[in-house]
Image (cartoon, helix red, strand yellow):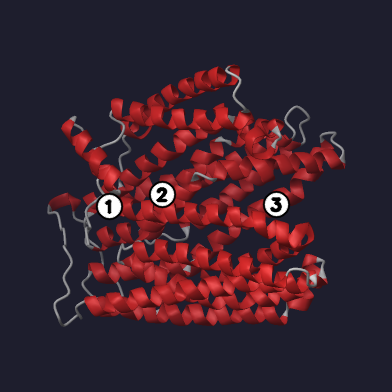
Amino acid sequence: MNRGPYAFVRGATLLAAASLFSRLLGGLARIPLTRLLGGEGMGLFQMSYVLYGLAITFSVSGLTVATSRLVAEALAHERPREAWGVLGRALLLGLLSGLAFWVILDRGAVFLAGKVLGDERAVAALRAVAPAVVPVSLISALKGYFQGHQDMVPTSSSQVVEQVVRVAAMLLVVWALQGGEVGAVVGGVAYGNLVGAGGALVFLVLMLDRRRGREPSARGGWRLDRVRPPGPSRLVLPPRPSATTGRILGLALPVTMGAVVMPLMDAMQTFLIPGRLQAAGFDPRQATYLYGQLHGMAFPLAGLPAIAASAMAAALVPAIADALERGAAAQVQSRISTALRLTVLLSLPATIGLLVLAAPLNQMLFGIPEAGVPLLYVSAACLLIAVQQTTAGVLQGLGLVSVPVYGLAAGLAANTAVTYYLTAIPALGINGAALGIVAGFGVAAAVNLVVVVRRTGLRLDATGLLVRPAVATGVMALVAILAHGWLTAAGLGCAVATCSTVAVAALTYAAALVAVGGIRAAEVEFLPAVGRRLAALLTRWGRP
């Protein structure tokens, strides 16, 4: 396997592509599901999903990160048997946590449906979705093992398998049970999660069996390419203890705590915004409508580019851990620098694109162009979320798993304070809440970035990191404004004009980025065939 300084980019690309495909498929599946279940059935389905999502967060969110980091650490020290031991302990922990949350959801279904969700018909859906927590927990451990090898193919492939099987099972069940009692039908549909997770688990077990058959044992001379630069670029690390269940938990629990902060931030805004809007002079119906514009339309658009950053973070954990454990300080810094550059290269144009096309995007997607106003304010969160997630992956790879939790906690405090004061100002209203989101992720990203720089001695290249991408983005923004104006004046509909503008803007940005030297061949050579061709061209043009 190629373990060069940019090899993790290919893994991040695979994960991002799989995540995007899964989201698109899930979104498309909602159309026939909604038609077959109706609004009432979809409401019950979504309510059960909220609690299922919380169970998954507590059960598995930190396990993949902990497993991937400890496996990468073991392999860096040429201890493959220890890597298998990490997997065994992670599977046991996943099994125990999955069983625990299955019992909680199943035995507590009546209470949760009646008292928490407010609709006892959700009992069947809760009990149907509960068993899926077990295979999902086991899947998280297996994904962590493969990611520790810096092999993202099993993870990305299993994600696609799970979504395809899940959607197919759901549609088949709802078609077979249509016309029945709504609670029972929704419960049947919820079993699709178990079927999908089971399919992904079987796929990963087969992939694991193939890997075990290929790998030499510790006695057979397992050998990784080890790069130990002499002099000051060599990190001197104290010997680390062997991976134990306690070390897995020590890494997993802070990550889980960080994952819980995000729903808390959403919950805080849900409880706070309507009241503060009413304090600004809006009536309750207006407050609810404005809240829907921000959290139902604007903020989801701002969060979409974070798919790439989330994939980058997952790929960075084992890549950073591997270089760190081998004492390769220069490679640690190189991988961090590359990850930050690529994060900015992808998220900065997305941020400005949302700013320039806020109104037409909302008109095209939701039919409510006025939702573009809060999008103008919240669009900066697009870049900040991406930086926060990428730096969180770096810190987790460095073993500093608690720092992202502190950053998110500080971000939650900033979000709460800014939302509380600005949303009550009549001139700002819901835009004050949008600025609260920006402030929250800005603080969280800043905390992470400061710690990364201080702990690694990383020197940020302002020209490559910000100036060149900003110039290319500025050219893109100008072309996008002119193109949308011309296409609209030509009489094209909103959807055609907006989609065409996005395509033109993307091509313009790519060309401008190459022209100003904003991307190097080494950063794209690990991508699929098109990336390798681009790398060859960049090398020919003198930008290796």
Q: In this rendering, would 222 be left or right of 502?
A: left
> Foreground residue, 407 or 92?
92
Report the residue marked by disc 3.
Answer: 268
How far is disc 2 from disc 1 in space, using C-alphas?
A: 15 Å
How far is disc 1 from disc 3 in space, using C-alphas?
A: 37 Å
Q: Are marks 1 and 3 in contact (CB under 8 Å)?
A: no
Q: Are marks 2 and 3 in contact (CB under 8 Å)?
A: no
Amino acid under disc 2: Val
Looking at the rendered structure, the secondary structure element under dot 1 is helix
Amino acid under disc 1: Val
Looking at the rendered structure, the secondary structure element under dot 2 is helix
Q: Position of residue 381 (x, y in %)?
A: 55, 40
Mark 1: give few (<14), some (14-19) or many (20+) Cα within 10 Å.
many
Mark 2: give few (<14), some (14-19) or many (20+) Cα within 10 Å.
some
When the figure is inspected, residue 238 is found, relative to residue 419, above or below; the finding is: below
Q: Are marks 2 and 1 in contact (CB under 8 Å)?
A: no
Q: Position of residue 467 (x, y in %)?
A: 37, 27
Residue 273 seen in the figure: yes
Report the residue marked by disc 2.
Answer: 451
> Foreground residue, 515 or 95?
515
How far is disc 2 from disc 3 in space, using C-alphas?
A: 27 Å
When the figure is inspected, residue 162 is found, relative to residue 415, above or below; the finding is: below
How many marks are shown on the rendered structure?
A: 3
Looking at the rendered structure, the secondary structure element under dot 3 is helix
Report the residue marked by disc 1.
Answer: 332
